[in-house]
Image: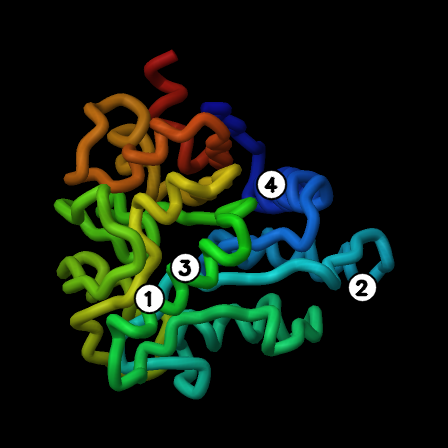
Amino acid sequence: MELIIAETYEDLSRQSAEDVVQLMRGRTQPLICVASGDTPAGVYKVIVDKVKKGKEDISDWSFVGLDEWVGMNADDEGSCRYHLNEQLFHPLEVAEHSINFFDGKAIDLNKECTAVNNLIKKKGGIDVAILGLGMNGHIGMNEPGTSAALRSHVTALDPVTQKVGQKYFKKQQSLKEGITLGVTSLLESRHIILLVSGAHKAEIVRKLLQEEISEQLPGSLLLKHPSLKIYLDKDAAKKIQSKS
């Protein structure tokens, strides 16, 4: 594990984006796992700027979405796919055949899970996974207590996730279930970039780094990965810095 503490969120976004493109550059037809959310948005902005300025070529990249709310897909404003369309796929004009994403409105959600698992296998695995850390320590929609042995699966959402998730929508939503890549899917990635920003995440960061690895704190399971980089801004890192 490598821990990088950036001065600001903007620095975190720039440094981690540089890392992502460097790791992807070294692969042939690479597959990248992308998370939606506030923190990764800055990384995507940097990548989009690089491509628009001709400094990076992502034409051979393939994308797999980390998760989606059950009952939603790209047509729903506020969905995970909706935000990634706005922040990444549409600005980069990514072809639809290069995007692999759970459809939370699918009649057979287990079939969706199987299709994504098969896609990852066909591509030879995920090259880089960009992840965030939830207020309750979740990664994707792998909630506290979720088995680390799972790949893609449908899950009941923790009350914390149901509450925090409302910020992505203009109107109150019923967020009961999610469909997500599992911990095993993520741990099989070649490289993992975990991004955490803001003082409101400082306590969960402290727990992640200083308490026992446990399925009750899903993010801690990533600490077992041989190529994990954790990027924090100073606000998110403030409780671990006080221990040094």
Amino acid marked by disc 4? Ser
Q: Which residue is denoted by mark 1 in the rendering?
A: 114
Q: Is residue 31 above or below residue 100?
A: above
Q: In this rendering, which labeled residue sits more in front, label 3 or label 2?
A: 3
Residue at (71%, 40%) from the top-left corner?
Answer: 26
Q: Which mark is residue 16?
A: 4
Looking at the image, tell me whether mark 1 or mark 2 is earlier in sequence order.
2
Q: In this rendering, which labeled residue sits more in front, label 3 or label 4?
A: 3
The span from disc 1 to disc 2 (Cα, nearest Å) is 35 Å
Q: Which mark is residue 66?
A: 3
Looking at the image, tell me whether mark 4 or mark 1 is earlier in sequence order.
4
- Residue 106 spot, x, y in % from top left: 31, 83
The span from disc 2 to disc 4 (Cα, nearest Å) is 18 Å
The span from disc 3 to disc 4 (Cα, nearest Å) is 18 Å
Q: Is residue 38 visible?
A: no
The span from disc 3 to disc 2 (Cα, nearest Å) is 25 Å
